[in-house]
Amino acid sequence: MTDKANIANRNIVLEIKDLHKSFGDNHVLNGFSMQLHQGENLVIMGKSGSGKSVMIKCLVGLMEADSGAITVMGNDITKLNQESLDILRADIGFLFQGSALYDSMTVRENLEFPLRRHTKKFGDNVDTEKLVIEALENVGLISAIDLMPAELSGGMKRRIAIARTLILQPKIILYDEPTSGLDPITAKEIIILMQEIQKKYNTSSLIITHDVDCARVISDRMILLIHGIDYAVGTFKELSVSKDPKIKAFFKQ
Amino acid sequence: MLVINNIKDTFRSFLIEIGALSYFTSRFFKDVFKRPFEFKEFLRQCYNMGNRSLLLVGITGFIIGLVLTLQTRPTLMEFGAVSWMPSMVGISIVREIGPIITALVCAGRIGSGIGAELGSMRVTEQIDAMEVSGTNPFKYLVVTRVLAVTLMLPLLVIIGDAIALFGSYLVENEKGNVSFTLYFNQVFNALEFGDIIPATIKSFFFGLAIGLVGCFKGYYCKKGTAGVGKAANSAVVFTSLLLFIIDFIAVFVTDIFYDL
């Protein structure tokens, strides 16, 4: 975890204000707001179907919000054109819940794929091979470079997905349920890896999870998403001793 | 009353589907001329769809040619018109049977493959991952596949036609002792540009329909593995229906221009 006392004074890299999103009569987000500071690990917890994934997809422009403002590193993403959004996306890493590795490509091709659109970020003489190897070394899976995703275990897939996220050297990483579907030991390894990455690259991380252990270990701050709003904000310690039954329900094991 | 409501709902969802497919098609034509062009992926798809369908198209064509000749021969013999066999088989294969059978085989092989592949990419968030990485998934996945199948299908039709005619020749050679040169001389003497050009143009539209419907069904696949199966299945069903509609329109238009 990072130095909590300093976090509030750091720059805000990502801000959501009064976000609304509905699917017909189902109002998923009802005015959700949050701020992510530079170098912070912010965990968002909520029940299944509470709108966590919808919120994170609105953040990267995969879904359009009904109303509200989303500012990423000073850019209002709802007002960006496609080209500017794509450039901004190079600074936002996204780890999908199911890893989302491209089935038809090898691990090497999976890692090279994001680089093909963002050569400007690294210059024209970018050494793709070097970047791929560096990203794989970071996740300890250099030996898997020529394997297909189908040949990897769940934990390995998650690590490769993290490597693919890292290859563009993003300033913000969004993790959608990074430990879901993994055994406790592998989940712990992934959490340690996330901490190492944060330390090495000083990234800001937004982690969506309902894994209490993950939240306890990694979070600098937490937001509980209940009824489509930021129901409670605080550190893990503060929230875990809350008397509010809705908050307490999250920490019962 | 319930039956009427069911019919209404089915008709309504059919119209919605047609509307969505029309929008998808217009998006394809808009994006096809926009940069960046995904040449590498396009060539990979051409290889996948063309080369890997060759055996299936070849076997189907060969059997069709063989069977058509075997079934028609006795009737033509009755009328003493067996010498017309190469002309008749040539015209029917080039004009109609070759393109439609090849297109139907490809709807099953390519259309369902595209539907299942894109559907599985949709449900496992690979398409979202592509978009987040700054690549336009519509251009990378849809435009390349539709273009590849549109270009490959006429080639497959030509190859399928040639193999079907060869199958027909084998029967004629066996039963009527007709030489290779004589058989194919008669075939090409009977064929006109009015037979070949409309059939080739029609094949492009068949390819376009297979690509567009397969991609449409896969790209908008609903969540879950059941959704992937449904996408693949409905891609084949919808494409097959569309192929016959296109065929009807093509024959109708050809009739106006070439006075069949």
Image: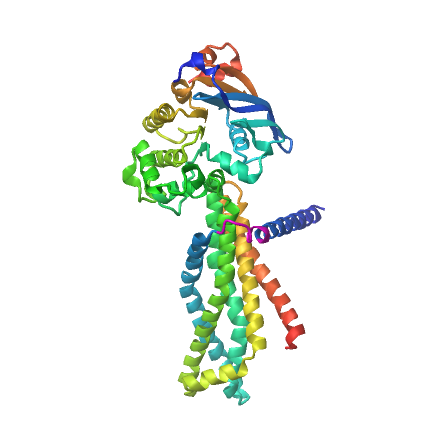
- Rendered view: B94 above or below A16: below
The answer to which of B186 and B69 lies nearer the viewer is B186
The answer to which of B164 and B175 lies nearer the viewer is B164
- Rendered view: A45 above or below B164: above
The answer to which of B174 and A213 lies nearer the viewer is A213
* Relative image position of residue A107 (x, y in whole percent): 35, 42
Which quadrant is home to the C terminus of chain B? bottom right
Q: In this view, does A165 lie to the left or right of B200?
A: left
Q: Which residue occupies 48% across, 62% down?
A: B152
* Relative image position of residue A177 (x, y in whole percent): 44, 29
Q: Which residue occupies 41% across, 59% down?
A: B47
Identify the magenta region.
B29-37
- Rendered view: B53 above or below B116: below
Residue A226 seen by the camera: no
* Relative image position of residue B242 (x, y in whole percent): 59, 59
- Rendered view: B111 above or below B163: above
The quarter of the picture where residue B57 lies is: bottom left
The secondary structure that dominates the magenta segment is loop
Q: How many labels does the image show?
A: 0
Q: Which residue lies furthest to the right in this view?
A: B1
* Relative image position of residue A149 (x, y in whole percent): 36, 42
Q: Is residue B179 magenta?
A: no
What color scheme is it? rainbow
Residue B176 seen by the camera: yes
Q: Which residue lies furthest to the bottom in this view?
A: B80
